[in-house]
Image (cartoon, grey):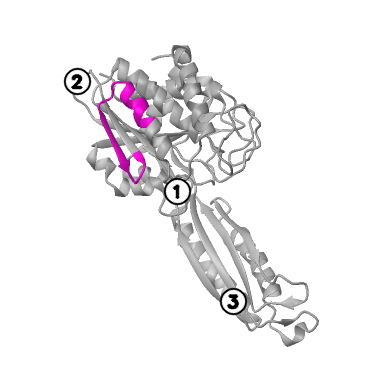
Amino acid sequence: MRSVETFRDIQREATEWRRYLHENPELDYRLYNTAEFVSEKLASFGINHIETGIAETGIVAVVQGEGGDGPTIGLRADMDALPIVETSNKPWSSKIAGKMHACGHDGHTAMLLGAAKYLANTRNFKGSVALIFQPAEEVELPSGGLRMVQAGIMDRFGVSQVFGMHNMPGMELGKFSICDGPIMGSQDDFDIIVKGRGGHAAHPYRTIDPVVIAAQIVLGLQTLVSRKTDPKESLVISVTKLSAAQAYNVIPDNVEIAGTVRTLAPDLRDFAEREILAAAQGIARGFGADIEFKYRRSVPGAVNNKEATKFAVKAARDLVGPASVNQNMRPSMGAEDFAYMLEARPGALIFLGNGPTASVHHPAYDFNDEALPYGIGYWVNLVETVLAP
């Protein structure tokens, strides 16, 4: 297996790719320039099997090894940016107003391109590698990961296992973290409309005040975690939106509440949907009001396969040494639509250290270019581990 020093030569070129993508961010499925850039690079590496336009702007490119017959594994990178005004003040800051790569997808794309170039040149593996460049990870349903699975990429390209990687700000550069089983939470979203009776704020006794009722509901929902969920289980219920009257002297007819639910346990999604409705409805009716309730299942939890995780750990350890690979990381309650690919095929998601940078989705965030050879090296080692000739 190769150490990270093997991939220093490609770092400069990958840095140029990454910074170009950072300067030219695109959103959701509208990745026309990005997809063209990626496709042209893949073709320049001598890769002949490149399919574009999957889920609008997604790409799958296949590299055949020279080690004989074998399975196909998938490596996935997301490509889309976020609608955020950048404040990093880097020389390569976004040139597109109101858009920026605030989650490191520019780095993810550059690392997979770097691995593609290396693998296309060496082909020191059996079987083949499907390089999956995905749009629209950051959007609401249907996300790019779901749509690429629905487009049949796993069957069409014969993918037997699929692997993903995401950078992690705050984790030391050159380190990796992973665990088998659940590694990231599911995401569901809910909306509650509290339906009372409005009136003048000077005469609340003539109203059924939905603002007070909404406040009680917000507090009541917290007990679903603290008093109705096993503390050994993971459940987060966060109210993130409240909308009432726009005037100081008006009690509105309705108040809108919205929030998100995150969990590592699939059965807790059913619990949350049932209990949020029961709690909100019970509180509202106790005050003489009622509610409308909507609950949307969004991204499922990301669950790493045990055997695939072993391959990932070995590939990372061979690159940076055992001391730099944490194989028992605590799962994150954040959501990642790579989960759809992990539902379709066994595989593993790993996290790569980005150093002491701003957090993802922050306007000052920037992917650390010093992480590029680590990510490229991980992909190459993983391929040569799983598909050893």
Q: Nearer the viewer, mark 1 or mark 2?
A: 2
Q: Is residue 128 above or below residue 101?
A: above
Q: Secondary structure at mark 1?
A: loop
Pointers 1 and 3 in contact (CB under 8 A)? no
Can residue 54 be found in the magenta stretch? Answer: yes
Q: Amino acid at mark 3?
A: Gly
Where residue 124 appears, as percent x and y from the top left, is: 29, 16
Q: Secondary structure at mark 2?
A: loop
Which residues lie in the magenta part?
38-58
Q: Quadrant of the C terminus?
A: top left
Counting other residues with Cα less than 10 Å from the Cα at mark 1, is it few (<14), some (14-19), or many (20 or more)? many
The residue located at (52%, 34%) in the rendering is 104
Q: Quadrant of residue 313?
A: top left
Which mark is drawn over residue 282?
3
Q: Quadrant of residue 72?
A: top left
Q: Is residue 282 above or below residue 21?
A: below
The residue located at (28%, 18%) in the rendering is 123
Q: CA distance from mark 1 to mark 3?
A: 30 Å
Q: CA distance from mark 1 to mark 2?
A: 35 Å
- Upstream in sequence: badge 1 or badge 2: 2
Can residue 67 be found in the magenta stretch? Answer: no
Q: Which residue is disc 1 drawn over? A: 301
Q: Nearer the viewer, residue 93 or 388?
A: 93
Counting other residues with Cα less than 10 Å from the Cα at mark 3, is it few (<14), some (14-19), or many (20 or more)? some
Q: Amino acid at mark 1?
A: Gly
Instruction: Determine whether, in the image, residue 65 is placed left or right of residue 172.
Output: left
Which mark is drawn over residue 68?
2
Counting other residues with Cα less than 10 Å from the Cα at mark 2, is it few (<14), some (14-19), or many (20 or more)? some
Where residue 342 appears, as percent x and y from the top left, is: 37, 42
The residue located at (36%, 20%) in the rendering is 117
Q: Secondary structure at mark 3?
A: helix
